[in-house]
Amino acid sequence: MTDSMKEELRKAPFVAVMLDETTDISNVAQMSYVLRYVTDDGIKERFFKYEDVTEDKQAEAIATRLLEFLRESGCIDKVVAQCYDGAAVMASGLNGVQAKVKETIPQALFIHCYAHILNLVLSNGASKIRECKVFFSHLSGLATFFSRSAKRTKLLDDICQHRLPRAAPTRWCFHSCLVCTVADKTRELREVFEHIVDHHTEFDDETVHCSDGYITLLTSFDFSFWLKTFHAIFSYSDVVFEILQNKGFDMQFCLARVDQLQRQIEQEKGNFDSVYDKTQALVGPPRGRGAQGDVRARYRELHCSVIDSLLTQISNRFSDHKKLEFLALLDPQQFGHYCNYFPTAALNSLMESYGGYFDQPRLHTELAVMYGMSDILGKSPADIHQFLLKKGLSESMKQVYTLSCIILTIPVSTASVERSFSALKRIKSYSRSTTGQVRLSDLALISIEKELLIALKAKDHLHDDAIKFFIQKDRRMDFGHHTASSGGYTVDQDIHLADAADPPPCHVAAGQRFSACCLWEQMAATLRRHGHHQGEVLADRPGQWTSMGGGLPWMTDPEVPDNEKSSSSSSPANGAIRPAGMANVNVLENQKPLAENTPEGPAEDVQFDHLP
């Protein structure tokens, strides 16, 4: 699998790197490496490995490890972007990892994970207002109430038939799933709490007390008002979250969805009266001092404050778009306009960031031609990339093809890295907390990149490639002389497999080439095919087997003195080493194999399947 991914990297024109760090069950800091690139099949985001960074998590050390990984992967000259979260050690423009990487790779544009930004927008925008913070604390208490008791959870399953999701440690979506669940199951939740109060003798005092309080909470105007408000907002933001975490979308498309979210949230300002009236019809008027008009005005002010806070957060955190102005060059909504007014500013932005990859006059000409092509009108960068490949235009319009590859390579979020942490928790669990680093990465690779594994298994040569890879490792068993150029072993003389039983003998001719690590397996398979299930392996010539290993149950000939016996790397000076459970092996120099007639016909010389 690693070789296949490295082959994809070799063919990819550009690469983007994504990093994130988490702590596993054994309290080891694991850095996850994911690379994004474009192939003829589209966008790929591949997990490569975990790395232990417990000793030093400073920016200098992380950047050094990252650059070393890129050099080993052979793609350091192809890196055009780097994407991390907003932690200072990663994102700082002065001494962060992204700044250290830019010292070596100046064109590696830094992208702050957009999904992380949107998460910060929702969390910070909502928590700035006291009433909102109280609302979310009550909401979290609902989930905690059921998670602490199996009996409560069973009652929730019976009545509500839906469990309340708990907030993830990374706080992705900031309780949005919980808000939507409570909003959809408010009536059922009230039934659960009322059942507990009505059957108070079956529950402990704390459960009854909390249930009575939650009945009051769910019927309060304040809680219901904020529940409807945030349910409307999260219904928009969840869609954008899904888009930002999808590796198949390009940056231009995701930015357009963020702008659309901003407009939708702004429209919520005009929906205050609808939200207020629906809440009042559901639970009654709010309790408060003063005239009813004053209470309504206060809620209107709070509602507008929440909306304004969210809009301000979006404007501030997504304002750094000037460095990505060149994305407008392939904006499908603007192609008709660009036919008359060429986007010179966007072209200049591209040349500032990636001028070394383009011939500006040639790019200008190709873009002008493309904007006038009806076949490309309205196509996204991914569609343009596929169109140029299918039509054979990747060379004749090479500048536009390169531009599409760069735009598709730039990542939007580190969602693929976050997903690798889920695999880490499944693999390195409490019962398997001592898993080695290499094994951990390999198991995670099989789990995360299972689609690639399935594709490789569909090819006939996967198992042959796996065998060829593992036979390159040296083994302690030597069957003759080793040829370094071929990685195999040549049998010096004929090996004749015979037994006192009826099945015919087996033969390997001198001069055939084998791999040391799989010769015993081939011998065992051949013997089983010919009915040899008992007996033992004997080397007639002393010292023939000079090195034994591989985990077989070796036995030393009884004639060998105890002080000369060996069970590992060296053979005894006299006698034979016998692996139990196999037929006799006689080394016969320059002698033809025995041939006997059997009821089925004359015996055949059975040769082991040898590898090139």
Image (cartoon, grey):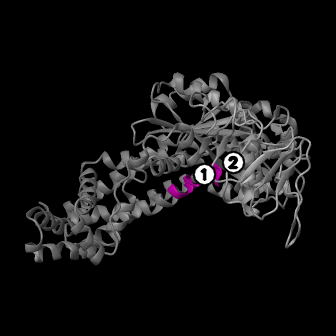
* Marks 2,1: beta carbons within 8 A: yes
Q: Position of residue 260 (x, y in %)?
A: 54, 57
Q: Earlier in the sequence, mark 2 or mark 1?
A: 2
- x and y, in percent, of residue 311 in the image: 44, 49
* Amino acid type at mark 2: Met
Q: Is residue 559 visible?
A: yes
In this view, the residue in front, 173 or 589, is: 589
- Of the 4 image quadrants, the one containing the C terminus is top right
Q: Is residue 192 left or right of residue 305?
A: left
Q: Is residue 255 above or below residue 194?
A: above
**Pointer 2 local density, CA inside 10 Å: few below 14, some 14–19, many at least 20:** some
Q: Mark 1 highlights which residue?
A: 446
Instruction: Find the distance from the CA under tag 2 to the CA under tag 1.
Output: 8 Å
Q: Is residue 542 magenta?
A: no
Question: Which secondary structure class fits the magenta region best?
Answer: helix
On the question of residue 38 being in view, the answer is: no
Residue at label 2?
1
Using a 10 Å C-alpha cutoff, classify the residue at mark 1 as few (fewer than 14 neighbours), some (14 to 19) or many (20 or more).
Answer: some
Q: Position of residue 410 (x, y in %)?
A: 66, 43
Amino acid on which disc 1 is placed:
Ile
Which residues make up the magenta segment? 241-257
Most extreme residue toward the front is 559
Give the camera-side residue of 439 and 515. Answer: 515
Q: Quadrant of residue 70?
A: top right
Where residue 239 sits: x, y (%)?
A: 51, 61
